[in-house]
Amino acid sequence: MNTNKIKTINEKTLIVTMDIGKNVHYGYFRAPQHKDITPFPFYNTGHSFDKFWDKLCLFQKKHGLDEVVVGFESTGPYAEPISNYLRKKPVTLVQVNPMHTKRVKELTGNSPSKTDRKDPRVIADIIALGHILTVVVPEGAAAHLRRLSHARERAIKNRTVANNQLQDLVYIIFPELLSIFKASTKTGMYLVKNYSDPDRVLSVGVESVYNIIRKTSRGRFGKDKAKALYHSAKTSVGVREGKESMLFEINHLVSIIEHENEYIENLEKQQVVYLKQIPYSQSIMSIKGLGPVTVAGLIGEVVDFQNFNTIPEIMKIAGLNLFEISSGNHQGRHHISKRGRALIRKLLFFGAMNVVRSGGIMHAKYRKMKANGMPGIKALVAISRKLLRIIFALARDNAEYDMDYNKNHSYKIAA
């Protein structure tokens, strides 16, 4: 979505709102002078969408209206089929913030009640006030990047769940293993997969354990680790009852993790393919510390950096715009709104962690913030905002990052 507010609600505008559901939506039409219809249900099917559109056109013609603004809450995937259908029609698609709906709802009848027939009217009230955002639907390579980034996030979440379950089981059967090797490392995962049973470690002997560890770690770990693991297997306090069943589940969880790792790797390869189709993507990747996964995720969420005219617009969609609560003599502190797309903030935060490392483009700036007493997390958020400014400027001007851009002025710096 774009942060530009719609300012064309007038006496010739038809306001159409939808309360989105999984299978059933509720539609509502409002013409000027409070002429409207009772909210009505329609369904998530092509035939029902056509009937909805025919009804809309008849209402528009009856009242002689020139423009149609269709609005709905930001409700995740359930709105995608109908919004995809309507974006091909001569209408302006807008979204409203669910928080705004909740607050305005309480003003309607002085009641917090939520019903399918009440919500469309509330959404129409918000649209009439102008508190709305235009919907930008990603197309082409940007659409693929968004889908791939979301798929990657889900895969990482699934892998994390499996990892946590795996560590719980290993802790029951061979707790000492996790204190010697981290399950997140290649060597640790190999040992968890093949030697999470202490008896298995004892059966192969300390010399074989050493050779296994040396080979899987490529010489990083040696005899000290092998002896520690073998000794721990001898004195392990792991539970033996039901051991075979736990080993069976451990093998299953390892398979899930391996599958998710392979899937994530393939997703990242696809991201690189579509990233090459975005002309300014190479400009953003010229920033040392931002890799293709981060850049692909940012473009997928923003859709097109070049659609934005000012940095406050892009800050708002990221939820990195600042606000404060002050009253009288009390001067409030600045906080980020967190009302934009959460994945943008996550990607920028991890990107900030990379650019503040020794040799990174923001290392000196970060050190200065910390020296001035700013907490680490807050400093990284501030770096995220600065990073977004640079990304916006590079995408806008199709320029590459220059470490000495303040001196050379090779491109305009985002205000």
Image: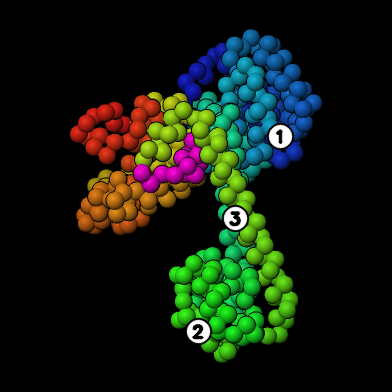
Q: Nearer the viewer, mark 3 or mark 1?
A: 3
Q: Nearer the viewer, mark 2 or mark 3?
A: 2
Work out whether mark 1 precedes mark 2 in sequence or the reverse, and give the earlier one.
1
Determine whether the residue tagged by mark 1 lies in a helix, strand or loop: strand
Residue 24, quarter of picture: top right
Work out whether mark 3 precedes mark 1 in sequence or the reverse, and give the earlier one.
1
Question: Can residue 172 be seen by looking at this rendering?
Answer: no
Task: Give the residue at x 43% y 26%.
Answer: 306
Q: Nearer the viewer, residue 156 or 12?
A: 156
Q: Is residue 258 above or below residue 360?
A: below
Task: Find disc 3 in the rendering and name its residue.
Answer: 261
State the predominant SS element of the stretch in magenta: helix
Task: Find disc 2 in the rendering and name its residue.
Answer: 227
Determine whether the residue tagged by mark 3 lies in a helix, strand or loop: helix
Work out whether mark 2 precedes mark 3 in sequence or the reverse, and give the earlier one.
2
Give, as a three-letter code, the residue at label 2.
Answer: Lys
Q: Nearer the viewer, residue 201 or 311?
A: 201
Q: Quadrant of the C terminus?
A: top left
Span of residues in magenta? 288-299
How far from the left and from the top, in percent, is residue 62?
Answer: 69, 11
Q: Is residue 327 above or below residue 309?
A: below
Task: Give the residue at x 70% y 75%.
Answer: 246
Q: Nearer the viewer, residue 392 or 268?
A: 268
How far from the left and from the top, in percent, is residue 188?
Answer: 54, 70
Q: Nearer the viewer, mark 1 or mark 2?
A: 2
Task: Give the residue at x 65% y 20%.
Answer: 88
Give, as a three-letter code, the residue at label 1.
Answer: His
Q: Is residue 349 magenta?
A: no
Task: Give the residue at x 49% y 35%.
Answer: 299
Determine whether the residue tagged by mark 2 lies in a helix, strand or loop: helix
Question: Can residue 205 be seen by looking at this rendering?
Answer: yes
Task: Find disc 1 in the rendering and name its residue.
Answer: 25
